[in-house]
Amino acid sequence: MSAFSIYLSISNKNLGKAALAILLTLLKSDGEVSYNRCENTKIYVQNFPQMFPLLQTCLEDFDTSMRELAMSGLVCLLELLPRGSLDQRDAHALYPGIIKRLDDSINAVRRDACRAFIGYVNKRRSHGTTLRSLVG
């Protein structure tokens, strides 16, 4: 996680991109490794409030490959999180970022934004939260 945090403190885009690629590799490998997935999922749930703002910053990057990596990472993260693990605050922070990427200029980012939105809908808690309350 600390390697990914370097992205915000160092202006070297290549280092930030490498850190994001490492995070994406870790997230993708967790989907394949079942013996430690449960323990790692707890870590992702606990650290989602810190990881999402970093991913959101990368989603706003001018570099298209950075946006592709960030959206792919968000999709992987949402696939790993258990159903109902997004609380109200996380849900409100996540929704606008995903919706904005549905209008991205890159097809892969738009496709992953669709996948992320499906993951978002499946993972948020339903304490009376409706799509209408998120939009309005």
Image (cartoon, rainbow, N blue to C red):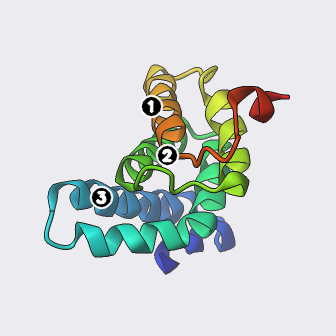
Q: Amino acid at mark 3?
A: Thr
In the picture, measured across the screen, residue 61 lies left or right of residue 45, that is: right
Q: Secondary structure at mark 2?
A: helix
For label 1, the residue is: 112
Foreground residue, 86 or 111? Answer: 86
Residue 134 in percent (x, y) is at 76, 35
Label pair 3/1, CB-CB below 8 angstroms: no
Image quarter of residue 133: top right
Q: Earlier in the sequence, mark 3 or mark 2?
A: 3
Residue 20 in percent (x, y) is at 45, 59
Q: Amino acid at mark 1?
A: Asp
Q: Residue furthest right?
A: 136
Foreground residue, 101 or 85? Answer: 85
Residue 135 in percent (x, y) is at 79, 29
Residue 40 in percent (x, y) is at 33, 72
Q: Amino acid at mark 2?
A: Lys
Q: Secondary structure at mark 3?
A: helix
For label 3, the residue is: 25
Image quarter of residue 13: bottom right
Between circles 2 and 1, the one closer to the viewer is 2
**Distance of label 3 from label 2 (alpha carbons):** 22 Å
Q: Residue furthest front?
A: 128
Q: Which mark is residue 123?
A: 2
User: Residue at position x 27%, y 54% from top?
Assistant: 28
Quadrant where the C terminus lies?
Answer: top right
Q: Earlier in the sequence, mark 3 or mark 1?
A: 3
Q: Residue furthest bottom?
A: 2
